[in-house]
Amino acid sequence: MADRIFITGAAGKTGRALLSLLARDPAFAGARITCLSRPGSPCEALLPFGVRIAGGDAAKPRSLAKVYGGEETVIHLSSIFHAGAVLEACRGMKRLVAVSSTRIFSKSWRRAKEIEAAELAIARSGVPFTILRPTMIYGTPDDRNVSQLIRLVRKWSVVPLPGGGKAVFQPVHVIDLASCVLAALKTPASAGKTYNVPGGSAHSLREMIEMIAAALGKRVSTVSVPLPLAEAGAALLGLAGRRYARSAEQIRRLREDKRYDYTEAARDLGYSPRPFAEGLALEISGTGL
Ligand SMILES: NC(=O)c1ccc[n+]([C@@H]2O[C@H](COP(=O)([O-])OP(=O)(O)OC[C@H]3O[C@@H](n4cnc5c(N)ncnc54)[C@H](OP(=O)(O)O)[C@@H]3O)[C@@H](O)[C@H]2O)c1
């Protein structure tokens, strides 16, 4: 298997889950792993894995090139928008596994076309690549979706549901995504392919709130907020600054159906994601990662 691996975004949710899987996998015993980390970024969580930390910025080809040591395998997790810089800086790579996003399918998100362009650049690069497109990733206290819903349900007895909570999500547990990255690494036949990587079950926001309340053993009431009102609130949130921009985007996308088919990942990579109820139980108990 790969002897020398270079990972961008290793300190993030998917990166940490991946490192824990790599550490337990005999196929990667003895592999030399270098993790890119932005200067000043907290990377203490990586140290127990015995990896080498290289300070640099994945968005800047020159900064990347300074620390890329000719590793044959590159796992690109920091952002699909850094794909151009990675392709430019990591010239010697022989295998690239890059994580993109199902946001590429969004009709309302202004950067969907940029994801398309980034994926195309990878596909045209000549490097044997596999692109994985996860849905929203959950499973850690720092995820910015399910953990927030859990906090909301813990704190409030009445939960507001934009549009009656009808919007459907298929969140993917971070360990399932990390397992899929590992499977892609181990499957040369996945080179040249792009896969959707959603979770094992799809639920409306209302169902998710009900599942969270049941798992916490709490009674909550819900109140529907008309979508136009929620969208107006989201627009204001967006104006309030970058910190809120993501929440604003999530509300804008509530009109979109976020169910995705993973037949191809199941067939080629043995991808078999857990249902949301199972991942939720892990997240609430603080286990699994
Ligand atoms: N989270 C989701 O719901 C979701 C959904 C679909 C797709 N994705 C994509 O899936 C991938 C993994 O997501 P994740 O949620 O596991 O990531 P994450 O937890 O947000 O972590 C991202 C990591 O990338 C690093 N990073 C960001 N910009 C960088 C730069 N310019 N140079 C070097 N490092 C940089 C961050 O370092 P710092 O500590 O310095 O910030 C962090 O360690 C990402 O590409 C993301 O866009 C995420």
Image: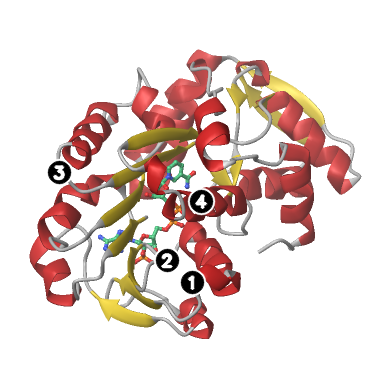
| Residue marked by disc 3 | 125
- The nearer-to-camera label among 1 and 3 is 1
Question: Nearer the N terminus, badge 1 or badge 4?
Answer: 1
Tell me the amino acid under the disc marked 4: Ala
Is label 2 in contact with label 1 (beta carbons under 8 Å)?
yes
Q: Amino acid at mark 2?
A: Met
Q: Which residue is mark 1?
A: 28
273 or 73, nearer to the observer? 73
Local SS, label 2: loop
Tag 1–tag 4 contact (CB < 8 Å):
no
**Crowd class of label 2 (few under 14; some 14 to 19; many from 20; radius 10 Å):** few
Mark found first going from the N terminus, 1 or 3? 1
Proximity of marks 3 and 2: CB atoms separated by less than 8 Å: no
Q: Is residue 62 above or below residue 167?
A: below
Q: Secondary structure at mark 3?
A: loop
- The residue under label 2 is 1
Q: Position of residue 67 (x, y in %)?
A: 18, 76
> Considering only vertical position in the picture, is 15 above or below 97?
below
Q: Nearer the viewer, mark 2 or mark 1?
A: 2
Residue type beneath disc 1: Phe
